Image (cartoon, rainbow, N blue to C red):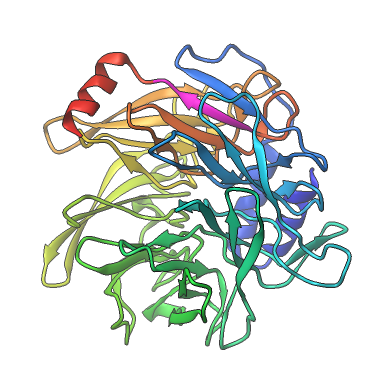
Amino acid sequence: MTMGMSCTAHRLQAGKFATIFATLIVATAGGVTAAAAQTESVLYSFAGGTGDGAQPFAGLSIDTTTGNLYGATFSGGSYGQGIVFELPSGATSDTVLCNLPGGNGSGALNGAGPWGTPVFWNGNVYGTATYDSISNGSVLGNGVVYECAANGSGYTVLHQFKGGTSDGTNPFAGLFLDSTHTNLYGTTVAGGTSSNGVVFQQPISGTASTILHSFAGGSSDGAQPYGGVIIDPHNNLAGATVDGSTLDNGIIYITPIGSWTSPAIAKSFGSSSNGEIARSTLLTDKFGNNYYGTTMLGGGVASDGVVFDLFALGGGRYSYSLLHIFTGGSSDGAQPYAALIEDASGNLYGTTTSGGASGYGVVYELTPNGSGGYNETILHSFAGGTSDGANPYSALVMDSSGNLYGTTANGGANGHGTIFEIAMPTTLTQSLKQKR
């Protein structure tokens, strides 16, 4: 195993999520080579070492004006603590914008091991680093919120998590930037009054962070929000947790921003047949009526996860339904970590970390079938080896033409992960342009 994987598994060995993660780690070893589908191409393979990043568990942000892609890697770089990078549109090599400093040999603890997808805004990249430093295979500290200038001029810690009862510990998810471009919102998996994680608000100016909610766990609240938080069109905060509720399978929470005075459970995951362990950030439609997400496990005999829809009925009531149950094996994906994205036609797109023709995960599309259900199409099964990526953990992004981009944590020419593109059919991309 690489250092990034081993230290992450070490940090998470307490709790059921550790077992699941360890299983996925084992599945990434080795490789079966196969020709990639015509629609998928590897744009870049990370080189690792001190000059480049490795293991991009995080997804990509896109500058819709230039088409440039921005992201972060868990390890690699000058200090081995990860990097923030840019892949300019049409480029064949990335640019390292910031090297996460970690301990930097000075005793300072300034951010290491980013898992969450960063946000690009106004020439800067904003993100979370899960730890403060990684040293000799061990992870240290509570993590940070950082700003990285896209012009390469510097790296700034906006907030260093203190842990304990008064602050969060270890942010695994990326950040959400509000519509005023004033505040960033995120989650941590631990810390807070009951040590079950928090939802926080971080001003983009770098002033003090605010804890909006500390999860209580138990039967009345969620615990361990590995996914991030969003703000829906009704000005509600919405997200999911992997633990908490009566059966300890997690919850979906939806609550007005600024008035979170009690647990706000919109859905408790009960029977595993309906999915369990919602690791992803939610997606809401433009009306704020539907909340889409994925669970890593549950849903069927294979327990390979589901795609779900939580529909707002009004008056604080919600209807929950399954849009797809993953079956794994060679014909379907398994264990989706990632959030979904939606195109202008209402089609949903996502990734799974495993399953597919070679067992290294897939990119899938869910298309409304006109009868209230969805049909799944596998757009690409990752082949691994040196010619293709393996194990995508993050959500996709879409450019203005409807093409999809993402990262894989493993595979590629150097075995350190890739940036890939799924080129969508011309007829579809033209249709999307017209609808936008």
User: Picture coordinates of residue 249 (x, y %)?
Assistant: 44, 64
Q: Position of residue 404 (x, y in %)?
A: 42, 30
Residue 93, percent across and down? Answer: 65, 28
Q: Is residue 103 left or right of residue 354?
A: right
- Position of the N terminus, as image quadrant, is top right
Q: Determine which quarter of the picture holds residue 370.
A: top left
Start and end of the magenta stretch? 418-423
Closest to the observer, 209 or 155: 155
Is residue 421 a member of the stretch shown in magenta? yes
Q: In the image shown, does 310 or 214 lie closer to the viewer?
A: 214
> Number of numbered discs present?
0
Is 161 rendered above or below residue 11?
Answer: below
For residue 356, side relative to residue 412 (left or right): left
Describe residue 349's horizontal placement relative to residue 386 as left or right: left
As drawn, 151 above or below 88 = below
Q: Quadrant of residue 92?
A: top right
Residue shown at 38%/32% (left/top)?
399
- Whether residue 220 is in magenta: the answer is no
The answer to which of 356 and 379 lies nearer the viewer is 379
Residue in view at x 47 percent, y 66 percent? 186
Q: Is residue 249 left or right of residue 58?
A: left
